[in-house]
Image: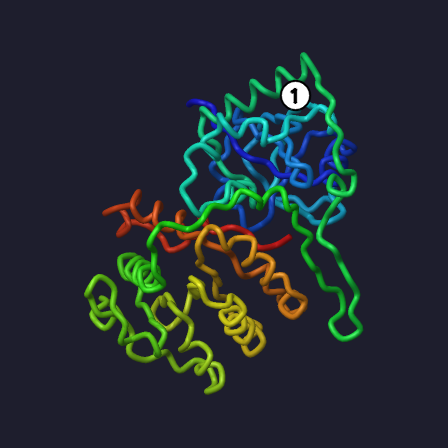
Amino acid sequence: MSRRYWLDLFTGKTWDEFLKNGATVSGFRENRKRMAAKIHPGDYLICYLTGISRFIGILEAKSEWYPDTKPIWTSEIFPIRFKVELVLKLEPKTAVPVLTLRDRLSIFTSIKPGRQWSGFFRGSPTEFKPGDAQIIIDAMENASRNPVERDYDQRKYWRHAKVYESREAGTVTVPDYDKEESAIVEPVTEKVTHEEMQWLLSKLGSDLGLDVWIARNDRNREYNGISFQTMPRLRKELPMQFDEATNKTVELIDVLWLDKNAIIAAFEVEHTSAIYSGLLRMSDLIVMQPNIKIRLYIVAPDERREKVVAEVNRPTFARLNPPLPTVCQFIPYSALKKEIEQIGDRVKHMKPQFIEDIAEDCIT
């Protein structure tokens, strides 16, 4: 089996802690378990520092993933772990800035108008195309043989989400974003509508064998001349498992997937409207039903990624129990459309959980 290549994100702090603990274990968040299961011994993890946007190391996976909560990192547990071997290590000053490779990596050269390259570096593990991986590895090996020192901002190297104490809310987190990573934004030219994404999400759920709910106030809309009312497996009423207040909130969520009477996923499409309104519906659901197990997703244009993540991490949402950033993920339009195209007729044999593979974390 040929070697595969994966992105492994670090901050300066988590990289330093990784090295101090022997550089033999790398970890990922619990909700990346499905993607981590695709990593096998012999695969390479390409280490990227988010604060200063540089490639700093290469690890070889020496095991399948295993659960472990032994303290390694102080910021998070990262319980989905791999035994690894350090193949190549650079220093922060000699690490390879990703922007020095922008003319060669498909992350940049194949990007469509309105897309942001930084989305690739939003969560890990994420698989590299073999050609991109080889370009990065070659650049890192050259940097090891012929180091070039480049100054970097120490504050960005050590940066992490800013944590504040609120007398009313307790501990809340406010993200601190790197402007460099959101700088490449082009005008949106692709004609995608809210109705199209709402239709695609509904049809995908229906094709998966699930019942679907479309927001009550959107039932009279149509896409490509086809009325939403004709959607197969469209539910006319929600299951009576909630109180009246909860039902009034739930029935306005753009798309719901239901397995019998259980709602298993909720999607808010935020095309051009204020993201805040959709998040309020999500947060109301959490407040009114704190023990409910529903996967929550914000589906939006790729260029709104930074905005979505920033809004999800507002203190008003981060102080919920559970915090909204831990249960709500972002799905970019491009990833959803690409996945639907690639799956084709196989969708009937897929499990709904596959949607987690294209969703991105909102935790900062």
Q: Residue at x 44, y 54 (%)?
A: 301
Looking at this view, is 167 or 61 the one in front? 167
Question: Which residue sits furthest top?
Answer: 145
Picture residue at 53% right of the left edge, 33% below the top? 6
Q: Residues within 10 Å of mark 1 (few under 14, many from 20)?
A: some
Residue plotted at (48% across, 34% down)? 108
- With respect to residue 295, does 33 lie above or below? above
Which three-letter amino acid code belongs to the residue tagged 1? Leu
> Along the horizontal axis of the image, is 44 left or right of 94?
left
Residue 19 location (% of width, % of height):
75, 31
Q: Please determine whether, in this image, residue 213 is positioned above or below residue 28.
A: below
The quarter of the displayed image where residue 164 is located: bottom right
Q: Is residue 159 visible?
A: yes
Q: Residue at x 44, y 57 (%)?
A: 300
Q: In the visual, does 175 lie left or right of 263?
A: right
Q: Kindly identify which residue carries mark 1.
A: 88
Placement of the N terminus among the 4 image quadrants: top left
> Where residue 119 sits in the image (x, y, percent)?
52, 45
